[in-house]
Image: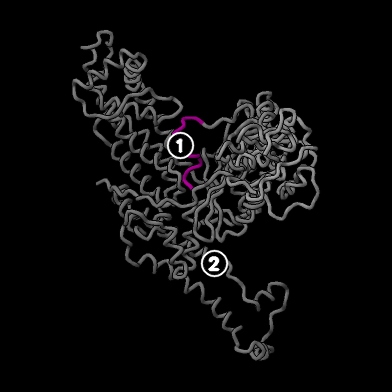
Amino acid sequence: MATPTENNALVNVETLPVETLPNKRRKKKSIVWEHFYIETVGAGCRRACCKQCKQSFAYSNGSKVAGTSHLKRHIAKGTCPVLLRNQEKNQLTPYSAPPKMGMAMGGTADTPKRRYRTAGSAYFGFDPDRCRHEIARMIIMHDYPLHMVEHPGFVAFVHNLQPRFDMVSFNTVQGDCVATYLTEKQSLQKVIEAIPGRICLTLDMWTSSQTIGYVFLTGYFIDHDWKLHRKILNVVMEPYPDSDAAFSHAVAACLSDWSMEGRLFSLTMNQPLSEAGLDNLRALLSMKNPLILSGQLLVGNCLARTLSSIAQEALMAANETVNKIRDSVKYVKTSESHEEKFLELKQQLQVPSTKSIALDNLTRWNTTYEMLVAASELKEVFSCLDTSDPDYKEAPTMDVWKQVETLCTYLKLLFDTANSLTTPAIQTTNTFFHEAWKIQLELSRAAASEDPFIRSLTKPMQEKFDKKYWKDCCLVLAIAVVMDPRFKMKLVEFSFSKIYGDDAATYIKIVDDGIHELFLEYVALPLPLTPTFMEEANGGSRPDEAHRETLLSNDGLGFTDFDMYIMETASQQSRSELDQYLEESLLPRVHEFDVLGWWKLNKTKYPTLSKMARDILTIPVCTLSADSVFDTASKEMDSYRCSLRPETLEALICAKDWLKCEPLETSKALVKMEFPI
């Protein structure tokens, strides 16, 4: 074959014939040859040239053949400028199939039936609607400001990434985010409508620099598969957050928004309510919701907030001691040379502690506790530090270290319980009876101590825990632990005998009466109607005695009277469910136990009691997210979010919660059983 002249390489693409291969070579079947031709550029060297943009690519050199993968990428990945221009004239609608390759090249519709595919990925057309959807999701998931779509840097980045995408405005992306929220809300609404039990709410009030409050309402519910779920349902702006009606207004808005009238079981608040606030709330719910146990289970306090408040008071009571330790830690941590001397001395003294000291964060009380614990374990190093570092002159005395150890002992009770609230899995209510009664018992004992420092430290802690949490929430937690077949009433009896001594029988009776009364309320709930009674409920008249024989003969087997008998005796039969459950032996205390799974397996045996257990075990004890459990102050809404419309703010926060992957499995961790004697 003759080598073409140099001028032949410049011949117009339209007039240049594609090289004809010798007959002995098989015919090229790849579809890329519809868009490329082969040009010989030297002895044994041939290149493939794009018919559209004239760019050439390596094809063969001697006996080595480059293949066609790189040619496919040129067409499929959109790097051919002519192909890009042609596609712009015929952009794809969302989720539509890409046009045939021949048409994309400006050819006719008579393209080969064999479709073109790359080895690594399929051909995807540019979809501007999909891009908008993903930008909205990105903003929701990562809390990016909506205005970022108008930031010059981001606009330039997107333009370089995809020049054909018309960047959206603030108003457009705001609408896209709200549309995403509404789509997710519709799906969640169907889930909530289908749940077999009731729903529990937590209310968490956020503050703002504008003196406006924002109430976060989070719903807890168990689905048909006995899985416990947690979803933020509403974020309600309250212009007057300190008013007695603030929480009742937020609850009313949530019940109306999600059509939950009559299905609310309990409320857990992040702050104590005034008597007027409680009255407003109960008045609202008595109209739209049946009050279980006369409202005794309705309003509970947030356990995390209570623990945080008590811990702060304890740290303030020992403020002088805490400051001395903080100053010593600060001396070591704010200078590299000081820290080096400290570590050298620790090694010389062979102190076995593996802890490292760190300054605390005053907005999180657990960091102060951890600072004190680490410093206490390294007290020997601090006591000897002045020998190797003459500038260190404020070493704490032995009395101070003793006070630190005492403070850490009682803070540990609060820390361990609060730490159990930070697990990613949603925990059932029964778990926290163990934690609460141990705190109540230990603080009660310490408050009666003969040691003046221990007594002065723990007496205010005990009084606050007893008043702000134990008295209000003890009944809820006790009933919940009775619903745990490993403990039932036995743990209530054991723990109350430790806490109340000779008066234990009185408090045990309160729990026993409460759980039986609650069970009777579930027994009295309306049963599903048979077709005969359904007709009567819809306005049909009940047949009189004269027609009873006809009715019996007409229904074939005479089951109408039988249905009436079942309804009359159902309550008597159901009453025995609770007593039967309580009389049966306790289950072994295994390391892992799924209490909801147990009730799922036994719902046929205990049809009414299982419904009660499902609702009781759903009650949340904490209103805060895991990352806020140790916070010393209420959450504050930032100024940017406050500038958004309330509807947009709610959409962004709720949609983020719904879109993130939620661990739906309830905690199966070991329930710690440490019985202080």
Quadrant in which residue 53 is drawn: top right
Q: Which residues are magenta?
A: 620-633
The answer to whether any part of residue 366 appears in the image is yes
Q: Is residue 580 magenta?
A: no
Q: Earlier in the sequence, mark 1 or mark 2?
A: 2
Q: Which residue corresponds to mark 1?
A: 629
Colouring method of the image: one colour
Q: Give the amino acid at mark 2.
A: Ala
Q: Are marks 1 and 2 in contact (CB under 8 Å)?
A: no
Q: Give the amino acid at mark 1.
A: Val
Q: Which residue corresponds to mark 2?
A: 524
Front residue of 301 and 344? 344
Q: Residue at x 50, y 62 (%)?
A: 611
Q: Is residue 630 magenta?
A: yes
Total number of numbered discs in the rendering: 2
In this rendering, would 530 be left or right of 540?
left
